[in-house]
Amino acid sequence: MYKPYETSFRGQRMSIKEKLMNISFWYVFFICLLAAIGVTMLYSAANGSWSPWAINQLMRFGVGLGVMIVFALIDIRLFMRYAYVFYFFTLILLFIVEVGGHVGMGAQRWINFGFFKLQPSELMKIALVLALARYFHASSLQSIESVKGMVPPLLLALVPAGLVIIQPDLGTGLMLIMTTTAIFFCVGVQIWKFALLGVGAVVMAPIAWHFLHDYQKNRVLTFLNPERDPLGAGYHIIQSKIALGSGGVFGKGFLKGTQSHLNFLPEKHTDFIYTMLSEEFGMIGAVSIILINFCIIAYGYSFAFKSSSYFGKILAIGLTTNYFLYVFINTAMVLGLIPVVGIPLPLISYGGTVMLSIMTSFGILLSVHINRNISVGKESSF
Amino acid sequence: MNRDNDKGKVLLKRSLIMACGMAFLLLCIIFRLYYLQVYQADKFKMLADENRISTRLLIPQRGIIYDRNGVVLATNEQNFQALIVAEQTADVQQTLDSFKKIMPLEDFEEERIKRDLKRNKSFVPIKVKDNLTWEEVSKIQLNASELPGIFIDEGLNRYYPYGEKMAQVLGYVAAVSDTDVKDDPLLEVPGFQIGKSGIEKYLEKRLRGKGGILKMEVNAYGRVMKEIEETEGVPGENITLTLDARLQEKAFDAFGEESGAAILLDVHSGEILSFVSTPAFDPNAFTRGLSHQEWNALQTNEKKPLINKAIQGQYSPGSVFKPLVALAGLEFGAIKPDTRYFCAGKMLLGDHPFHCWKRAGHGYLGVVEALMHSCDIYFYETAQRVGVDKIAEMARRFGLGQKVNIGLEHEKAGLIPDKDWKLRRFGEPWQVGESLISGIGQGYILVTPLQLATMTARLVNGGYEVVPTFFPIDDRTLLKIKKINVSDVFLDIVKQGMFDVVNHIHGTAWASRFDYKGMKMAGKTGSVQVRRITLKERQSGIIKQKDLPWKYRDHAIFIGYAPADNPKYAVAVVVEHGGGGSSVAAPIASKILYESLVLDPVDYRKH
């Protein structure tokens, strides 16, 4: 019987066929399953029509699947070698958006290539994980536990996070920070440092509050009390809860969600698509999505555990954490557990950029898995 | 290498902790889902239904009002209105401009349309103009291509075919105002109209009916997606009144330009056959909505078209009170049927002179002649002897000094004074002179035309206590009508006097007599001063009524009945500032009684 796992580490170079054989079938299956559910929901969001969303989303997923395979086939040492290059390239793009975006619309977050809108902040989520993985791969535990050793990775994270937050895109900025925090935690930064930071955050909160935009303040206030403004900022979350709750256990049925189809539910094809799914398919549908995502995340962790390289482990944990944050923030948001921050549900919400970046990170995760037995040197070299 | 090993161990440990943390957070999501979708599901299902289901009340058809012969007095007419739906036209202003070319719009109308358009979603129809004629409707339809977004809608409008002639009886309907009691959700429906006065108000609940309910599914913008279910309403009850539209019309027309009131009763049942207060208003205009100008004109009109004079007008009865005084005198023994007094044109009470209207005096006369001539002296004498309390008692037996409770608003009770009343009211004792004045129906006494009609009917129907009503009286109720405690003999004497008023050549209403197939009328005239005649005027000769300004002229009053020998119809006519009762009020009463005999709308019923 052919055992890909045993053949794969024979040499430090693998054939394409070997690599393809090593792609985790179930991982890809869960991704495709979620994407299929997403397309179905977009079909429903358009009141039972393939246009304008479902068909586009399907094509994007097709492209994304290709991108994922391409990245899966890339040698993990290449990621290591170009991690910083990619990071700084993305940082420059963020700067361009920050400068150019202000000239244009109020909060432009993308660079328009005509056929494709590139959102550097989305790219940064991957670039940051790569850069941190490379940094920690090379650093010793002493360095990690020292203050001095933490300065470079902190800068790596805070510069882009700051840029994103002033765009202003609080959600993405916080996601960058949270991903970084998760990586810091995993590599072994002392708990007391987090505690210190936590205390610092509490102290700084009133000052940070001062710098928040009004709409961001509103979102926080509205989260704390949705009835504060039932027709304005609180409307979304109230209607979302009504839609969810009225779905019950079994849901109202496909294409039969009254809240969604009568437009009481806002943004039903993007940020609030999970609400619509929960309205139409009830708790059974809603829990299924969580379980599938749980599987995807669990696979991510298993890739990390199986990877023999530290770089690969951090990469897998960082990207999986990033994915988890998407899922958790979006669902918790539509369920009224956290403020509305405008984070989509990956693979299901409509949107090209997130689809591409998520599929890219899945590709890298697969690459980590395929290259699990490849040893990665301290410095970037084959 | 050892440290690297540690690094790997730390990573494994920490990442396992984090994985557990993530699993825990996802579990929180599932618990939250359970809380919302199972635990609170019913609450949210209800809220979702509240969101999606919009109920609309369907306005029921208002009851139709008929007269005693089934003639329609108030009905619902198709009302065509032009509506504009903003989202159906590319340019609202252009559509409105084209509309104005076909049909001019007042500036305030255009302002209202624009305001409504701004306030409502673009799919909400906004009224452009209503009460369109057929001609206007066809004009709009012909030009439909130039009027994108304009639609014709038909609704129901209350319509009163008799207009002002019935206005004071029927009242009118109009939009609900803030002061109306909102006892029915229908009242919250935009455009719903309720009875604001008259029968329309009195019988509002019966006429209104019950609204149907239309349940619709709406989207977040309020647009109707589909109808879910419809519950039929109940149309309002149709009402039949005792009025006779023909007599009402004749009675109203009989007044011409005069201001006043007339009530025609069936003397045996009290059914009101005509009920006129003039001038009146056009209820159709009220229902349509009055302009500021129209409203002001009605308010400032010195003939007070908004006042229902038949029940709100309180007048001194003057000489038409004399039959009651005569009856009180006879009934309480102050005078006998053959008692005669001498009229010298004036009499002295102490050293205060009381004048008869005829300065030369009437000489000796009995009660019948005194009524015929309306001699003041005879009734001064009678009143002096019988006393005001007895007069008041008799007046009350005949329905004066109290409300009939006819059902219309602002009905007045009038005033029948007696000694107690004077003491209560002024803290002063009653003066004998005031009894004399009461004897000729002047002084404090106040009556409404409706009370006069009631009194007349009771005087001539054999002394039965009929109560005027707008609603048909059935035979059983008819038999229950009580007899007033008064002698038939004395009633006949009074009737003889009233017969002579009209049918004796010296009677005050001789000019108004008629003979229709042997049937004649009888009655009593009255003229009431609305200002004091000064001593100077008496000496210099009294100014003729027609030379006085309108508002200083006497009120002219006439009460009458027909046929004289077997009374069936009683009428009371008050003409405000009309001048003389015999010259102005009697001819109107005569016309009304004559027509009632000709048309004879009452089935012959007898006690």
Image: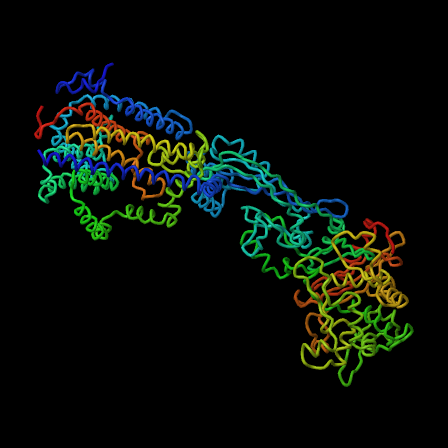
Give the side of residue B260 with respect to residue B191, left or right. Answer: right
Q: Quadrant of residue A330?
A: top left
Residue B544 can be seen in this image: no
Above or below, A111 relative to B242:
above
Q: Nearer the viewer, residue B576 or A103?
A: A103
Please, is residue A337 above or below residue B506 in the view?
Answer: above
Tell me, what colour scheme is on the image?
A: rainbow
Quarter of the figure that contains the N terminus of chain B:
top left
Which residue is at 80% across, 60% downward? B466
- Counting labels gives 0
Q: Position of residue A103 (x, y in %)?
A: 20, 39
Residue B84 in sight? yes
Asked whether, in this view, residue B568 is left or right of residue B255, the answer is: right
Q: Residue furthest right?
A: B338
Quarter assignment of residue A287: top left
Of the pair B64 and A203, the residue shown nearer to us: A203
Q: Position of residue B52 (x, y in %)?
A: 48, 39
Q: Position of residue B343 (x, y in %)?
A: 84, 77
Q: Position of residue B600 (x, y in %)?
A: 83, 50
Quadrant of the image occupied by residue A15: top left
Relative height, residue A248 to residue A15 (above, below): below
Asked if residue A247 lies left or right of residue B586, the reply is left
- The furthest residue to the bottom: B351
Q: Is residue A334 left or right of residue B448?
A: left
In-front residue for pair B589/B69:
B69
Q: Quadrant of the C terminus of chain B?
A: bottom right
